[in-house]
Image (cartoon, helix red, strand yellow):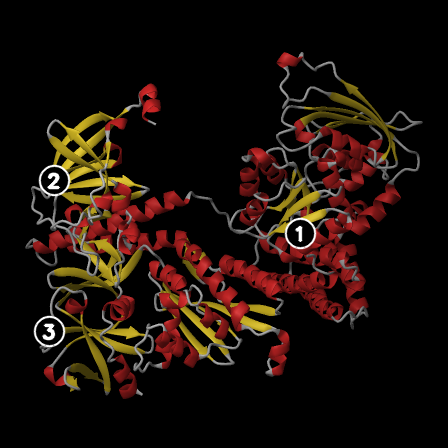
């Protein structure tokens, strides 16, 4: 059974790239444009993993993760953060916010899939 | 229904009673935020007649309803002796202009009598029950209906 | 629905254009000497992003140039080379070439543009001159590109397969983070041959077991061609949530490297390590500071969380703090009170018989200036550019065009226009509604459009701009427009308009906002509009705004929304009408004057108008319009405010003009009963409430008998 992945990013290019890369790897992808939209999607979907950007309008990645972790239903869901930088502070912040791991942009599709298998089997 | 209530020994309701146009009414004190003496209000042009006006409640604008008028009675000719009950319901804060406040008393919740069917006079739809305490006849008001103006306008 | 590669490619090129802009801006800053530390990072990131995308789309020439360019820039970024004029001159060439290449790639042409080779060799020469040691240049190049990365590391990997001994003991934080040790260990199997043993000794008895805690630890032996960094990468997400030890054994040698990841320290057990240039660890972990240093020092400094600096590519955001909106609102309110308080003070000082040159007046002047500046500053905190709103509208357009199967493009203008946050939020629903309607009913299907000679792709323009202290949002489409005679027929049929009424064009258009139209289905079938526009108008009005519509058959429809910049303060004229104090927003008022009998002209038996600068304007007596008193019969000597209404004016009679001042807008709490013509209220210096009026709404909703506006049209026209 293919894994359901929710990808949240405000950049259209990024969403499209994620959609393509995940689709080619055999995942079922669901897309959201920002944290708020992501939460909306989560009311109707329990994905196997979430990939989210940090800098987004309306509700940013940190706020989004925080909100997801507060929901009993999605408490343990693996969440990967898409980040353009891998500064330790940023990772620490992502971790503190409840992120499972991170993917550095621009991502290599293979790495992306590896990261997902590392957290969602 | 009644029996269950007896067994549960429900907490008493605390009610605030007041006079409007020679009749005594009451609402649950739970809704009452404060009581204020009447002060000159600013009229709202083209508002429904039961809207007495707006007053400055510590920097906020409070709409005051003329309760008599709302109940279909003669409008109150307000003076310093009148009282404004500041009530909060469903997140709305509203002032109710009444003649005077009379009493705060407790009664068991289940002792309210259902309203006898006495037709549908304009004020009747706001009265949910009638209490008799000593010799007084006190009407229990449905605050929600009073504040809910849209429904009133539709009626 | 997934976008095709071609579509992604298109949007990549669009993004590249903005990267190119940032690159050019940055270079000219350096050229002018106005750059700072961040400028160089920005320039670098721009090139880096272009390269990243180009690699994904396999645009070889672009990658080649961008990679060289990036390496050259790295020399400047790492302060090995100065960002001098000469460097900028050199960098402007690849910058232009990148533009050329992007254009070429856009046409799917992979040839090399003119000067490509020369530019490459110039960059190479620059890199050579500025790279002090081969090790540095290698590590820079290595880290610069994913593709290159793999190539050069594979060179460095030793042929003999090393064995890694791994000890992995997750702590209890691992599960809340969403990580699963099982999957992490499974990933090890991808690297090579693994033997894993699990230590269950720490599992407590069932009664003491907390299912959310981790009690297991694992030992793994991994035989792989991968290097230490790659092995370590498997534990990337969990390294701070566990005790992790990875040690490397060379099958035949005694060379071991011990990594104690929990303390982020690297210990060397082989002092000869630095002499082995092919040691994978050194290559993949360049010194984070980017400076050249001894291999030993670089190893000491290396942190496993730190990536090569090339990857730090976040946009240069100004430092910000996130503040609870409630706190901002509290501040806004308190400053509002301060402004009121200042007014009270001014008022009471004015009533004392102080000498006008008393120093207190100067101090008071300063105080009022300060209060007003403070108010402006706090308002700015709440202001936001409309960009986010527009971006959300782009999504609405995409989704609606998909469901209606029409090709529609959204063009926006004025994205940086700032409005109060609450106003922005309040605009979301109305704009969504208008845009959906425009696509669903306004814009024709592609076949129909080409039949009419219109381009197949429909267009919706969304613009925002500031205009005399207010904001105007315009939504226009190039669809079929609305059949005006049909609207009028319908309005007459449903009794919204008198059968004999003659309406101006704009009056007909604006009938669409009448509530009666919302429930009428046939109009939306015939003309395509009218569903729920009254709701749109109401929500705009609730924010103190107004909405107008103009439609041209076959050409499209334009909605214009006029809004206050902020919902918190307003400049207004305090006036008195029948002993009631009111505030009229200054933005409505064109001028004030005092009427003379000679200005007044009689039309028909009773309609009075005033003549100002050769134009006849209708007269509205505010006292009568608000129901305070009967209409005045004499206007001689009356105070009049000229109010702008769409493209015309009318004269509003008031009893007295008191003062002009800034007022703090307070919402009419819970708005019991509709109050037409009243947009809010404010508390004056004496604590009394003054209603803030919307004169245009007063004319529209409270004085329907003032139908003489039609005469004005015929006279003015």
Name the quadrant containing residue C299.
Answer: top right
Q: CA distance from mark 3 to mark 1?
A: 77 Å
Task: Identify residue for label 3.
Answer: C632
For the residue pair B13 and B83, the one nearer the viewer reads as B13
> Of tags 2 and 3, which is closer to the observer?
2
Residue marked by disc 2: B23
Q: Are marks 1 and 2 on the same chain?
A: no
Q: CA distance from mark 2 to mark 3?
A: 42 Å
Q: Give the structural element (helix, strand or loop) at label 1.
A: helix
Task: Please state the chain letter of the residue tagged with numbered disc 1 in the rendered image.
Answer: C
If you read the primary sequence from the N terminus, does the residue marked by circle 3 or circle 1 appear first? Answer: 1
Disc number for residue B116: none
Q: Residues within 10 Å of mark 1 (few under 14, many from 20)?
A: many
In the rendered view, does C678 fall on the left or right side of C82? left
Chain letter belonging to callout 3: C
Q: Secondary structure at mark 3?
A: loop
Q: Which residue is mark 1?
A: C77
* Chain identifier of the residue bearing label 2 in the image: B
**Would you say residue A96 is visible in this rendering?**
no
């Amino acid at each position: 059974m293919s894994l359901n992945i929710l990808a949240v990013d405000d950049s259209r290019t990024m969403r499209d790239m994620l959609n393509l890369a995940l689709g080619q790897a055999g995942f079922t992808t669901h897309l959201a444009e920002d944290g708020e939209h992501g939460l909306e999607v989560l009311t109707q979907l329990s994905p196997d993993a979430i990939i989210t950007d940090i800098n987004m309008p309306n509700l940013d990645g940190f706020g989004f993760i925080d909100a997801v972790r507060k929901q009993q239903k999605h408490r343990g869901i693996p969440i990967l953060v898409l980040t353009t930088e891998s500064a330790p502070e940023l990772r620490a912040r992502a971790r503190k916010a409840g992120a499972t791991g991170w993917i550095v942009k621009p991502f290599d599709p293979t790495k992306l899939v590896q990261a997902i298998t590392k957290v969602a089997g | 229904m009644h029996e269950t209530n007896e067994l549960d020994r429900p907490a008493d309701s605390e009610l605030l009673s007041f006079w409007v146009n020679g009749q005594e009414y009451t609402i649950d004190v739970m809704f009452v935020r404060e009581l204020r003496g009447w002060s000159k209000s600013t009229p709202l042009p083209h508002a429904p007649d039961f809207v007495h006006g707006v007053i400055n409640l510590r920097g906020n604008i409070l709409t005051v309803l003329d309760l008599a008028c709302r109940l279909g009675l003669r409008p109150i000719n307000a003076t310093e002796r009148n009282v404004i009950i500041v009530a909060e319901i469903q997140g709305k804060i509203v002032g109710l202009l009444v003649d005077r406040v009379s009493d705060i008393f407790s009664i068991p919740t289940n002792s309210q009598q259902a309203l006898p069917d006495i037709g549908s006079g304009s004020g009747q739809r706001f009265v949910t029950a009638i209490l008799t305490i000593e010799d007084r006849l006190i009407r229990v008001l449905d605050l929600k209906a009073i504040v809910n103006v849209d429904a009133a306008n539709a009626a | 629905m997934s976008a095709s590669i071609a579509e992604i490619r298109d949007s990549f090129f669009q993004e590249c254009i903005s990267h190119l802009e940032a690159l050019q801006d940055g270079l000219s800053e350096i050229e002018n000497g106005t750059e700072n530390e961040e400028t160089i990072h920005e320039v670098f990131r721009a090139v880096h992003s272009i390269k990243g995308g180009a690699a994904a789309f396999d645009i070889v020439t672009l990658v080649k140039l961008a990679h060289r360019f990036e390496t050259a820039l790295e020399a400047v970024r790492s302060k090995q080379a100065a960002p001098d004029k000469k460097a900028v001159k050199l960098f402007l060439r690849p910058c232009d070439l990148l533009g050329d290449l992007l254009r070429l790639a856009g046409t799917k042409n992979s040839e090399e543009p003119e000067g490509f080779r020369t530019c490459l060799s110039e960059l190479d020469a620059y890199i050579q001159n500025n790279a002090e040691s081969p090790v540095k240049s290698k590590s820079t190049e290595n880290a610069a590109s994913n593709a290159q990365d793999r190539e050069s590391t594979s060179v460095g990997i030793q042929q003999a397969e090393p064995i890694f001994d791994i000890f992995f003991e997750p702590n209890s934080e691992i599960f809340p983070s969403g990580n699963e040790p099982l999957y992490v260990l499974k990933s090890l199997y991808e690297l090579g041959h693994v033997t894993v043993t699990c230590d269950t000794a720490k599992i407590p008895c069932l009664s003491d077991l907390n299912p959310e805690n981790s009690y297991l630890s694992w030992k793994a032996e991994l035989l792989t061609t991968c290097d230490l960094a790659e092995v370590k990468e498997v534990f990337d997400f969990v390294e701070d949530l566990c005790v992790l030890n990875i040690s490397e054994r060379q099958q035949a040698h005694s060379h071991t490297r011990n990594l104690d990841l929990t303390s982020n320290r690297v210990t060397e057990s082989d002092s000869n390590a630095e002499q082995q240039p092919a040691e994978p660890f050194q290559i993949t972990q360049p010194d984070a500071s980017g400076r050249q240093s001894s291999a030993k020092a670089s190893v000491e400094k290396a942190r496993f969380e730190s990536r090569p600096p090339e990857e730090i590519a976040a946009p240069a955001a100004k430092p910000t703090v996130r503040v609870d909106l409630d706190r901002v609102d509290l501040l806004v309110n308190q400053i509002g009170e301060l402004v009121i308080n200042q007014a009270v003070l001014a008022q009471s000082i004015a009533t004392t018989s102080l000498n006008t040159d008393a120093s207190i007046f100067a101090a008071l002047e300063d105080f009022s200036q300060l209060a007003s500046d403070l108010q402006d500053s706090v308002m700015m905190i709440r202001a936001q550019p409309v960009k986010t709103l527009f971006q959300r509208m782009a999504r609405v357009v995409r989704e609606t065009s998909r469901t209606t199967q029409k090709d529609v493009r959204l063009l926006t203008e004025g994205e940086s226009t700032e409005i109060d946050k609450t106003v922005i939020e309040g605009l979301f629903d109305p704009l969504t509604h208008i845009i959906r309607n425009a696509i669903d009913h306004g814009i024709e299907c592609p076949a129909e459009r080409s039949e009419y000679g219109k381009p197949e792709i429909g267009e919706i323009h969304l613009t925002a701009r500031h205009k005399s202290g207010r904001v105007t949002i315009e939504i226009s489409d190039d669809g079929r427009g609305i059949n005006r005679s049909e609207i009028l027929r319908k309005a007459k049929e449903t009794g919204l308009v008198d059968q004999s009424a003659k309406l101006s064009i704009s009056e007909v258009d604006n009938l669409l906002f009448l509530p009666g139209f919302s429930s009428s289905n046939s109009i939306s079938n015939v003309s395509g509009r009218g569903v729920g526009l009254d709701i749109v108008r109401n929500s705009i009005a609730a924010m103190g705004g107004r909405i107008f519509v103009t439609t041209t058959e076959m050409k499209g429809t334009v909605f214009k929304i006029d809004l206050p910049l902020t919902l918190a303060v307003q400049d207004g004229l305090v006036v008195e009408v029948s002993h009631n104090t009111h505030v009229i927003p200054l933005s409505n008022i064109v001028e004030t004057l005092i009427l003379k009998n000679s200005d007044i002209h009689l039309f028909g038996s009773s309609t009075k108008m005033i003549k100002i600068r050769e134009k006849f304007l209708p007269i509205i007596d505010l006292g009568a319009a608000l129901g305070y008193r009967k209409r005045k019969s004499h206007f001689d000597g009356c105070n009049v405010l000229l109010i702008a209404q769409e493209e015309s004016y009318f004269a509003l009679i008031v009893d007295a003009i008191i003062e002009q001042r800034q007022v703090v807008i307070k919402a009419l709490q819970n708005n019991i009963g509709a109050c037409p013509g009243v947009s809010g209220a404010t508390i004056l210096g004496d604590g009394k409430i003054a209603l803030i009026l919307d004169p245009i709404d007063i004319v529209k909703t409270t004085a329907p008998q003032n139908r003489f506006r039609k005469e004005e049209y015929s006279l003015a026209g």
